[in-house]
Image (spheres, rainbow, N blue to C red):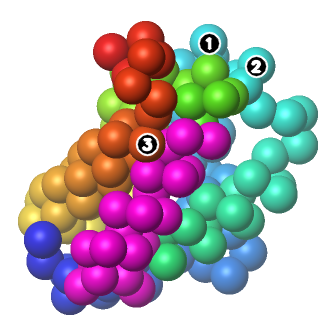
Amino acid sequence: MDAELLETSLALVDTPDDGLTRHFYAILFQRHPTVRPLFSEDTARQAKMLRSAIISVVDHLDDPVWLTETLGELGARHAGWGVVADMYDAVTECMVAAMVELGGEAWTPQMTDAWVEALDAVSGLMLLGYPADSDLAS
């Protein structure tokens, strides 16, 4: 994974007002309306938590133990909320779409590839946290 490219591309699209993650949720709910009931009506708090999680993951790319433990625990919580494996693909799709839109002409195909790879890895680690008897991960 290209940590430097992830950091620089995140800096390009991230805003302190949670603009990236708020835009992500708008795209997610438009493209995948069936996931909307999993969220509260006001997603501002969720957008703030998601932004913090993204920054934390990028900050810990060189710490596989932290990533495995933290994302596994996060995955277990998501399993409890009824999040299924297919939803992770929707998240990757919509987060990258938000980044592409916000990055504009400065966004590159290499940035897209780096984020797809990173978000797929995050999804995989989160799914490892699902209970063994869970049918949500399939």
Counting other residues with Cα less than 10 Å from the Cα at mark 2, is it few (<14), some (14-19), or many (20 or more)?
few
Given residues 57 and 94, the one toward you in this image is: 57
Q: Secondary structure at mark 3?
A: loop
The disc, 1 or 3, on the residue closer to the chain's N-terminal end is 1
The disc, 2 or 3, on the residue closer to the chain's N-terminal end is 2
Counting other residues with Cα less than 10 Å from the Cα at mark 1, is it few (<14), some (14-19), or many (20 or more)?
few
Per the model, the C-alpha gap separating discs 1 and 2 is 7 Å
For residue 52, side relative to residue 14 (left or right): right
Residue at image x 59%, y 37%? 78
Is there any visible trace of residue 12 in the rendered image?
Answer: no
The residue where tag 1 is placed is 34
Residue at image x 55%, y 40%? 76
Given residues 55 and 70, the one toward you in this image is: 70
The magenta region covers 57-77
Q: Quadrant of the rendered structure where residue 107 is?
A: bottom left
Amino acid type shown at disc 1: Thr
Amino acid type shown at disc 2: Pro
For residue 125, side relative to residue 57 (left or right): left
The residue where tag 3 is placed is 129
